[in-house]
Amino acid sequence: MKITKICCIGAGYVGGPTMAVIANKNPHIKVTIVDINQARIDAWNDPDASNLPIYEPGLAEIVEETRGKNLFFSTEIDKAIDESEMIFISVNTPTKTYGKGKGMAADLKYVELCARNIADVATTDKIIVEKSTLPVRTAQAIKSILDNTGSDVKFDILSNPEFLAEGTAIQDLLNPDRVLIGGESEDAIESLASIYGSWVPEHQILKTNVWSSELSKLTANAFLAQRISSINAISELCEKTEANVDEVAKAIGMDSRIGPKFLKSSVGFGGSCFQKDILNLVYIARSYNLHAVADYWEQVIILNDHQKRRFADHLISTLYNTVSGKKIGFLGWAFKKDTNDTRESAAIYVADHLLNEQANIAVYDPKVSNEKMQSDLNHLNTRTEEENSKLVQATKTPYEALKGAHAVAIMTEWDEFKTYDWKKIYSEMKKPAFIFDGRNILDKSEMENMGFEYSSIGQ
Ligand code: NAD
Ligand code: UDX
């Protein structure tokens, strides 16, 4: 099928950047990204590209170059579905918060709504592309909904999971390690492969069966997260033995079989994917009675929760076993640098733990608003909205957050944190002035020479 029009349902962290790059590299294809969230679509259409709903280095430039030419953002979902030959489903698949599988399984209601929407509207044959991360065998459910519409429209289902990481999404999309396409119909696979073929070398476009493709996505995230939990487990042992986790990571990473990436010890991984996808993997394994498999992967999450908790506990015990009424300055709230995304950020859980001990927290993050921080905390339902807004406040500058603070907690590895006037910060903090570097980004001896009591992860 010759593709001239693409529709993508879901204008989020994946749909937005992915389609912007596809449109940019395929000027002959009209790409329309649709969403039910009017405010989000309005932000994508904002003439000032610095107001896009997502912050990603390089994204605004690509959107500005392509929007209005062959890239469009709209809430007219039915129209975009009907006129397109290929439809990407890129909606959220969060962990279920109710019913069977609550807290573990992926909630597929948004995906199913998309399938039903397509089934209702489509009058011509379509290729449906699963871009969302889905449990293995979801394509079967989508196919069943689409094949029972009573019309003679033909649907081919492809799995094309997205491997971009936030903060580097544009680079990841422009230079992917691989593009994965799972499907049955060779024609449909070739139609999608030719779109990526506009900029991705052919040997990097991997074609598999649908189930392998679906399961590869969950497996990739599980392996990546497992590396972080592995090095974080070693970080705790380093703290007891005077080994240095960054030195250990370098030493093992130089083994070409292990490799250097994803070995940075931290306060714990966050983000919308790792935890959700591993919980989902665990749930799927249990549903097949594979309990040893499920227990194995669940440990990655257990260790990650432990890492966040022990960071907060260490801060409290160092501050003479109480943070009640003390000001703690947070640097960073996003789950990693170069994004405004805060989903599952370690900062939220560390803050919640400190707030239970009645700390006052002032936060500076270059890209996250006070409103977002409050909504992250309110979402936990640990205390009232009034209490959260009284105890936690975002500041306009880092110096405001740290002035008069008993301790600094570095939660995100934003580059700018390293460039601050740390002498000034020291002079304005309560003494002893403590730094808890949850990302190991500052130089320990430099900080100690200035007078700080510095502790980091695994050192
Ligand atoms: P997101 O929450 O940022 O965006 C999803 C969008 O879908 C929202 O704007 C929502 O309003 C919209 N939506 C939901 N139901 C809809 C419907 N029925 N019709 C129209 N729009 C609808 O989510 P995201 O981070 O972009 O993730 C999307 C999927 O991609 C998930 O399955 C996720 O696991 C996967 N993924 C995410 C990343 C990442 O880094 N964020 C990376 C790879 C894969
Ligand atoms: C991840 C996967 O990397 C990506 O392939 C997938 O498509 C979506 O999920 P993302 O969550 O956006 O991407 O960012 P990632 O760079 O993987 O970081 C996830 C978390 O792990 C962050 O909190 C990060 O700070 C943390 N991390 C990462 C570490 O603590 N140490 C590391 O060495 C790497």
Image (tube, rainbow, N blue to C red):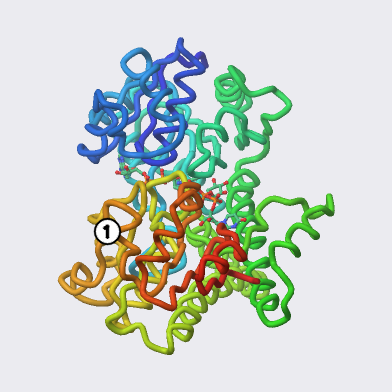
Q: Is residue 245 above or below residue 67?
A: below
Q: Position of residue 91 (x, y in %)?
A: 38, 43
Task: Return the residue found at the far top.
Answer: 28
Q: Disc count in the image?
A: 1
Residue 368 vs 170, above or below: the answer is: below
Residue 69 drawn above or below residue 39: above
Look at the image and tell me whether residue 111 can be seen.
no
Q: Give the left or right position of residue 197, taking residue 151 as reference.
A: right
Q: Where 82 sits versus 260, above or below?
A: above
- In the figure, is residue 93 to the left or right of 441? left
Q: Residue furthest left?
A: 386
Q: Is residue 171 left or right of residue 358?
A: right
In which quadrant is the C terminus drawn? bottom right
Residue displayed at 44% across by 32% down:
17
In what element is the residue under mark 1? strand
Residue 404 x/y as whole percent:
31, 70
Quarter-of-image position of residue 388: bottom left
- Residue at (45% x, 77% y) in the render: 312
Judging depth in this view, the residue of 378 and 57 nearest the camera is: 57
Dot 1, crowdedness within 10 Å: few (<14), some or many (≥20)? many
- Residue 33 in which image quadrant: top left
Residue drawn at 43 percent across, 88 percent down: 320
Residue 449 visible in rendering: yes
In front of the other: 253 or 410: 410
Name the residue carrying label 1. 394
Residue nearest the observer in this picture, 367 or 27: 367
Amino acid type shown at disc 1: Ala
Q: Horizontal and vertical percent for residue 429?
A: 37, 69
Question: Which residue is pictured at 41% across the width and 23% down the height?
Answer: 61
Residue 225 location (% of width, % of height): 60, 59
Q: Residue furthest bottom?
A: 321
